[in-house]
């Protein structure tokens, strides 16, 4: 049986769910960022698989994934800068301890 | 590529991607997570190439398995206290997080397998010039906005990391 669109979509859904679990279950900011990166990769797999297997006539899906990669990389740079900043100010990157605004 | 070969390539890559991704979210040490994440990005890049998106594969290798991986490893090292505590603890909500992720997989799996998807096949002979033509004609506005986004992200990251006084 040949590999089609459904296989790629299922793989991307599983990868997205793993990233979601990472974001929700970790305490370290850097580990949460890794989960976000996994989710972004799952989205890009979807874009490229749609571009390959749907009846389209140009590379719009791949171009959208170029823009998604751009935004994702900018996001990780800002995220790491925020993590440095928080670590400098509070000496921790554990999100459970960052509860200054808790009422 | 023949049918059997592409099937084998897909399943091997899917196994590597899911295995390394599970390692990323379950590993006790943050450095191990970062290394497994790099392996996951490399496998995703090979998957792009097997989907006839060779430029995206090259971008994935350069940006994710090169740039993002190095940024994350630097982040791990610079925010590490050097204690003997596990560097990557789970929080008290991890069971509920697992339930949410499992529900997501079940719902999305049901939707994907039941949805009637139109079948087609599109392979561009030259993805680089195809993408470049679209980027500089129809999609010129998003392209320029991406440039502004990158500039502001660069400045924002420097100011955030260095602080008001030093920057």
Image (spheres, coloured by chain):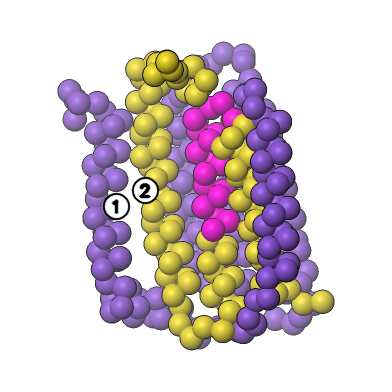
Chain colours: A yellow, B purple
Is B24 one of the magenta-colored residues? Answer: no
Image quarter hosting the C terminus of chain B? top left
Residue B53 visible within the image:
yes
User: Do dots 1 and 2 share one subunit?
Assistant: no
User: Could you tell me residue A69's position as x and y percent?
Assistant: 44, 57
Q: Main secondary structure of the magenta part?
A: helix
Query: Residue at the spot x=53%, y=75% of the render?
Result: A51
Q: Residue furthest right?
A: A1
Residue B13 visible within the image:
no
Is A37 one of the magenta-colored residues? Answer: yes
For residue A74, the mark is 2
**Placement of A36 over or under A82, stated as above or below:** below
Magenta segment range?
A: A26-43
- State left or right for residue B77 relative to residue A21: left
Quarter residue B12 falls in: bottom right
For residue B150, the mark is 1
Taking depth in this image into account, of B20 and A2 the one nearest to the observer is: A2
Report, in whole angstroms, how far the alpha carbon at label 1 lies from the one at label 2: 6 Å
Query: Residue at the spot x=52%, y=61% of the render?
Result: A44
- The residue marked by circle 2 belongs to what chain? A
User: Could you tell me residue B26's position as x and y percent?
Assistant: 69, 35
- State left or right for residue A79 relative to residue A26: left
Which structural element holds mark 2? helix
Query: Residue at the spot x=58%, y=79% of the render?
Result: A54
User: Could you tell me residue A65's position as x and y percent?
Assistant: 46, 64
For residue B106, the mark is none
Quick check: marks 1 and 2 in contact, CB under 8 Å?
A: yes
Q: Residue furthest front?
A: A103
């Amino acid at each position: 049986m040949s590999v089609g669109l459904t296989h790629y979509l299922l793989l991307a859904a599983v990868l997205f769910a793993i990233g979601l679990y990472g974001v929700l279950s970790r305490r370290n900011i850097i580990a949460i960022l890794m989960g976000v990166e996994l989710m972004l990769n799952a989205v890009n797999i979807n874009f490229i698989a749609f571009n390959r297997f749907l009846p389209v006539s140009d590379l719009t899906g791949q171009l959208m994934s170029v823009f998604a990669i751009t935004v994702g990389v900018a996001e990780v740079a800002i995220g790491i800068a925020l993590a440095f900043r928080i670590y400098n100010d509070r000496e921790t990157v554990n999100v459970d301890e960052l509860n200054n605004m808790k009422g | 590529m023949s049918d059997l070969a592409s099937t084998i390539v897909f399943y091997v890559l899917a196994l590597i991607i899911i295995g390394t991704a599970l390692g990323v979210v379950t590993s006790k040490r943050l450095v191990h997570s970062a290394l497994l994440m790099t392996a996951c990005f490399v496998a995703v890049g090979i998957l792009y190439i097997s989907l006839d998106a060779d430029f995206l594969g090259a971008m994935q290798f350069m940006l994710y398995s090169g740039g993002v991986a190095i940024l994350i490893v630097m982040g791990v090292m610079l925010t590490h206290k050097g204690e003997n505590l596990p560097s990557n603890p789970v929080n008290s909500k991890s069971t509920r997080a697992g339930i949410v992720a499992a529900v997501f997989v079940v719902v999305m799996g049901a939707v994907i397998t039941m949805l009637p998807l139109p079948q087609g096949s599109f392979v561009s002979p030259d993805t680089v010039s195809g993408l470049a033509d679209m980027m500089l004609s129809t999609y010129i506005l998003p392209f320029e906005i991406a440039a502004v986004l990158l500039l502001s992200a660069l400045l924002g990251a420097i100011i955030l990391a260095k602080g008001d006084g030093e920057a």
